[in-house]
Image (cartoon, grey):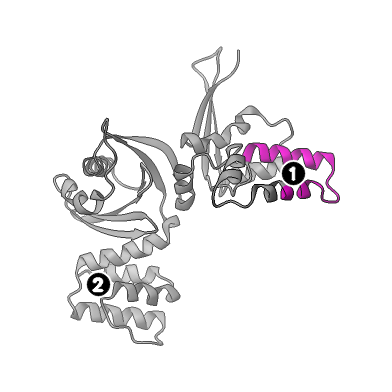
């Protein structure tokens, strides 16, 4: 066991998280009423005496990353099953490590959390070791992988995933970010934003009574002090961004090809903590004046397309 690495993993936890994590880890006895430094020292000593393995440390690190997914930049890949086949989700934990073994010296750990299979791959490449993380939801054909890995490691892992899950290929859907719950929302509920959200809100079995939704909207429009301009902005924002909570999109790239000068391309890149919310607020405050440009109006379709970039051509 690498004591230094164990200490680094333990230091990542906040004190209130550490007791809960170590209780689930169930590798050492935990005395009460210790501060964080005392607890870490106690755990390291106990682990050394108990011959705790590297796999145990990996399991603890996976526990931490599953609760702090925003520490990693994630990339999204759509798995394409063989014709006439469906993705065999149950094989991920059983066969993935076997499929990866010819390509990489590694250890794997799995954690099932809220219908998502979290996989940590500890790649051993002398003189260093690397960690790669995969998250795969049982209802989705999209997998999320930590972005900061070498190209060869990425290719080997994706090939092993395809072989494990019965897929012939994969597609980079060009959807990236640190807010993993929003990326999952974008891929699982493709029609939850924009104009589609009206139908989802009214017909979803988990939604409020549709008559109440209409009543709430009418009441909102009749509030005192709402003038025509504010009403127009609110309607415009709702028509584009819908009523549902907006998922977090951190980067968006617009590429404009010029019809008369095809060798030139204008690239506009938006970056921020929450691009969709920022654009929605710009519409609501009339900072982005009406009518809304088509390129902004069509932006929520990134949810349907599962992409964070658009290429369009300037009209002639």
* Outermost left residue: 102
The secondary structure that dominates the magenta segment is helix
Q: Is residue 126 left or right of residue 254?
A: left
Residue 124 appearing in the image: no
Residue 17 in which image quadrant? bottom left
| Residue underneath mark 1 | 285
Q: Which residues are drawn in magenta? A: 215-241
Which label sits in the foreground, 2 or 1? 1
**Does residue 111 appear in this view?**
yes
x, y percentage for residue 183?
46, 47
Residue visible at 49% across and 49% down?
182
2 or 1: tag closer to the N-terminus: 2
Residue under the point 37% across and 55% down: 115
* Residue under the point 56% across and 12% down: 260
Which residue is painted at 60% across and 38% down in the image? Answer: 194
Kind of element beneath mark 2 = helix
Compared across the picture, whether 212 is left or right of 315 comes to: right
Q: Nearer the viewer, residue 43 or 136?
A: 136
Q: Which residue is mark 2?
A: 3
10 Å neighbourhood of mark 2: few (<14), some, or many (≥20)? some
> How far across and down, in percent of the image, does residue 185 sit?
48, 47
Q: From the top left corner, tell me how far across and down residue 110 is, in percent.
A: 28, 58
For this view, does 187 lie left or right of residue 256?
left
Label 1 secondary element? loop
> Can you tell which quarter of the image residue 155 is in?
top left
């Amino acid at each position: 066991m690498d004591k230094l690495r164990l200490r680094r993993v333990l230091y990542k936890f906040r004190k209130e998280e550490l007791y809960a994590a170590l209780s689930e880890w169930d590798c050492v006895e935990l005395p009460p009423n210790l501060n964080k430094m005392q607890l870490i020292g106690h755990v390291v000593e106990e682990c050394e005496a108990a011959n705790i393995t590297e796999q145990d440390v990996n399991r603890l690190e996976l526990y931490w990353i599953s609760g702090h997914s925003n520490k990693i930049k994630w990339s999204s890949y759509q798995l394409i099953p063989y014709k006439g086949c469906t993705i065999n989700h149950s094989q991920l934990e059983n066969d993935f490590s076997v499929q990866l073994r010819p390509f990489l010296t590694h250890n794997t750990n799995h954690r099932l959390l809220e219908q998502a299979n979290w996989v940590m791959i500890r790649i051993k490449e002398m003189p260093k070791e690397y960690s790669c993380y995969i998250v795969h939801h049982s209802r989705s054909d999209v997998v999320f992988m930590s972005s900061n890995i070498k190209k060869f490691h990425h290719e080997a892992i994706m090939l092993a995933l395809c072989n494990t899950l019965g897929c012939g290929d994969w597609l980079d859907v060009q959807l990236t970010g640190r807010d993993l719950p929003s990326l999952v929302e974008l891929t699982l509920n493709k029609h939850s934003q924009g104009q589609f959200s009206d139908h989802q809100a009214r017909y979803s079995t988990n939604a409020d009574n549709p008559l109440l939704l209409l009543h709430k909207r009418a009441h909102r429009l009749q509030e005192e002090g709402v003038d025509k301009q504010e009403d127009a902005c609110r309607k415009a924002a709702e028509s584009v961004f819908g009523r549902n909570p907006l998922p977090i999109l951190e980067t968006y790239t617009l590429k404009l090809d010029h019809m008369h000068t095809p060798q030139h391309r204008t690239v506009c890149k938006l970056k921020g903590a929450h691009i969709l919310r920022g654009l929605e607020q710009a519409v609501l405050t009339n900072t982005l004046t009406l009518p809304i440009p088509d390129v902004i109006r069509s932006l929520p379709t990134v949810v349907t397309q599962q992409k964070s970039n658009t290429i369009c051509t300037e009209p002639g």
